[in-house]
Image (cartoon, rainbow, N blue to C red):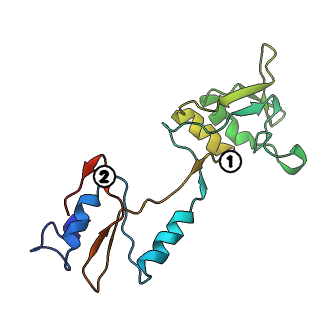
Amino acid sequence: MAVALGHNPESEAATNLHKLVPYLTGAVGLLFTSRDPESVTNYFETFRPLDFARAGTVSTRSFSIPNGLVYSRAGEIPASEDEPVSHTIEPELRKLGVPTRLVKGKVMLELTGGQEAFPVCREGEVLDSRQTTLLKMFGVATSEFHVALKACWTRESGEVKILEKEQGGMEVEQ
């Protein structure tokens, strides 16, 4: 993306586009729109859909799979409104460390030692890939997706407005 915008005034595609290049690091994207910058900023300030957690994030809640017949939402909704998981998922659950077995084509969670539920994660702990996979399998979205706007370029004026002052703890030269 940086090459397309231009690294310096001589190679840039339009006036001052090279000033955006320092912000093109990490997981970033470019948004091209005819809308005014204020309406775009307002939109993204309130745009926060739920998302599935990724490995390395801190769990915002505890989640366990109840003992017995395993349902697709693992007790998150009433059993009368839920449906049992497919028998084809059972090997994947076992690979992820969940003590399940098939009983007459139904996936059963069988715990020992008087446990009532299999703990997937606890609130406040850092999630690993196994836990995030299980959370996603059971439709548990614990993260909030958001877009942080870093800079804005306006075609008419060629002006670059910096919306985020710091990038990774460093000042970015304008």
What's the amino acid at mark 2?
Gln
Name which residue lies at 67% across and 45% down: 140
Task: Return the residue found at the far right.
Answer: 80
Task: Return the residue found at the far top.
Answer: 113
User: Which residue, given by chain and number where applicable, does mark 1 sit on?
Assistant: 139
Residue sitting nearer the eye, 44 or 65:
44
Task: Please give left or right for residue 72 compared with residue 8 in the image.
Answer: right
The quadrant of the picture occupied by the C terminus is: bottom left
The quadrant where residue 74 appears: top right
Q: Secondary structure at mark 2?
A: strand
The percent position of residue 166, horizontal first and vertical second, equals 31, 53
Mark 1 Cα-neighbour bin, 10 Å: few <14, some 14–19, many ≥20: some
The percent position of residue 1, horizontal first and vertical second, equals 26, 65
Task: Return the residue found at the far bottom.
Answer: 156
User: Which residue, given by chain and number where applicable, does mark 2 sit on?
Assistant: 167
Q: Is residue 11 above or below residue 141?
A: below
- What is the tally of numbered marks visible in this picture? 2
- Is label 1 or label 2 in front? 2
Q: Is residue 91 above or below residue 146?
A: above
Name which residue lies at 62% across and 26% down: 97
